Amino acid sequence: MRFAIGDTDFLLDGEPHRILSGAIHYFRVHPDLWADRIRKAKLMGLNTIETYVAWNAHAPAPDVFDLTGGLDLGRFLDLVAAEGMHAIVRPGPYICAEWSNGGLPYWLFADGAVGVRRNEPQFLGAVSRYLDQLAPVLVPRQIDHGGPIVLVQVENEYGAYGSDPEYLRALEQMHRDIGLTVPFTSVDQPMGTMLEDGSLPSLHKTGSFGSRSVARLARLREAQPTGPLMCSEFWDGWFDSWGEHHHTTSAADSASDLDDLLAAGGSVNVYMFHGGTNFGFTNGANDKGVYRPIATSYDYDAPLDEAGRPTAKFHAFRSVIARYAAVPPLPAPMEPGGSGTLEGYAYFGDGLEAPLAPATDLPVRLDRVASLAALLPAVTDWTTHHEPPTFDALGAASGFVLYRTEVALPSGGVLTIGTEVRDRAVVSFDGVVVGVLEREHHDRAITLPAGSGALELLVEDQGRVDYGPRIGEPKGLIGGVSIDGVPLGRWSASPLALDPVSTGALEVLGAIEPVPGDTLAGPAFAAGTFGLTSTDDRFLSLDGFRKGVAWVNGFCLGRYWSRGPQETLAIPGPVLRVGQNELVVFELHASASRTACLRTRPDLGHTEG
């Protein structure tokens, strides 16, 4: 088969073809659930699946390129093909996606000499190697090789960042050099000169917007007089940041804008069809004067929610799509107002689904407790330094680094960070927590009491900036540390082995005897077991806990934080097992309770209204 760009339409074997696509990021969904999410996209009436490729997920180190398990992009694309659907692939190299560092590997910028998203030899050399590693996955899965891929996007919203045509031409040629032959696209917002700045005449321009479809398409047509109109990011919701509200959009309003887009003859990629979750430490952050880390949930108020359940938006979009294209029949239980079963789920009239076996909320007692200090031998690998090293210098992509030095303060003193804390430091002196320094609050100084002993700063990378000029910046204690103006030297530092948790730490936790009590003083780990008779998706509630990270059966669910908005962490069903399961929580501060709860429904927090 052949896919091409005509004067007015996309052409599939020479015939006009409308792309009806939905975004699913394979790296945000448990791989055992990929087929389910793809099938539901088809049921909504879509004919294409779009995904970014997260370079840094595949390449955690310069000499590693992982295409296994949840990073098996080839398997994901094969599942798209098995459903009879096409695929759009967006390898970046920059993807934004509210993902750590916008998808760019932290190690790429460790020496400070490599350019970011520009025509610089070291950056382009690394991109070339990355694309060479992707070639065996992408090239044979193009439509003209019998695969599902019909379009490949070069870069991502570059017009909002720069306007370097030489950089874009170099990227385009690299994509061609690895054997990609399908049409190439670019995407930018139809505002100002972004469409012109972010593309080339040889790249088919597409737009990114979620409202005012008619006006946005008119601006796109102005920038590109011929060729099919396409919104390749039709924003049907939005992401959440810690400390803000949970974002939702009106299903009716979004459906109306989609109707306008399709009525104008446009093609579309719904962003997101299914958002998924920022498991582990993969969330990004924004910094436009104030640092804002992205929440763990990437539900996005999408047609398919975080647990893969159709929402009211699913049915509203499906009704719109049915006016312009044939849609497959829904299984009877999925029809609005219907009830019944489909592949182990019961669907109800509101379009939501619930496990067929009526599960109930399940309390989980965390009765085994160990302080961070007690587990340090199992999660650290200390090195010594004249000044605090960055995460990047220590080979830590994310998570936590513990910094330690010895000081004597007969009269106390003021500890000061030279430039910036990136991103949050719990400060302890002689075994006692004295306070927190937060990048979000622009904190740089804290008072220390009189005494002598170990000064420790437990620094958390809360998410690497994914958008704007601060992409690629290092993490840690930037600019050195001083007390009353005197620089501190002789530092020991170590990343904490938490994703995954080290085997040694789990062995220590497993050997601890249960202890009574209902509170938890951090930084500390707490663990408990729970039994299940089925492995449906669940949601972990940590009411009473303040801030930290949680794992189920060794799988890192991600970060929790009492500031919200989200109140629960998603637990994919494939992570659970019938019989005994293990929950581990790392609490940074303190908890009023040592009882967590497995819930059957998510709680993503308060909304703006």
Image (cartoon, rainbow, N blue to C red):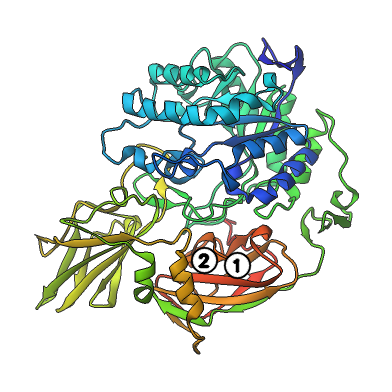
- The crowding category of the residue bearing disc 1, from other C-alpha atoms within 10 Å (few below 14, some 14 to 19, many at least 20), is many
Q: Residue at x 54, y 17 (%)?
A: 203
Disc tally is 2
Residue 168 at least partly seen: yes
Q: Is residue 211 left or right of residue 17?
A: left
What is the quadrant of the N terminus in the image? top right
Looking at marks 2 and 1 on the same chain, the residue that comes earlier in the sequence is marked by 1
**Residue closer to the observer: 449 or 115:** 115
Q: Which residue is mark 1?
A: 540
The residue that disc 2 covers is: 550
Mark 2 closeness class: few <14, some 14–19, many ≥20 residues within 10 Å: many
Q: Quadrant of residue 529?
A: bottom right
**On the picture, is 85 further left or further right than 595?**
right
| Amino acid on which the number 1 mark rests in the picture | Leu
Q: Nearer the viewer, residue 44 or 387?
A: 387
Q: Up-down: is 454 above or below 444?
A: below
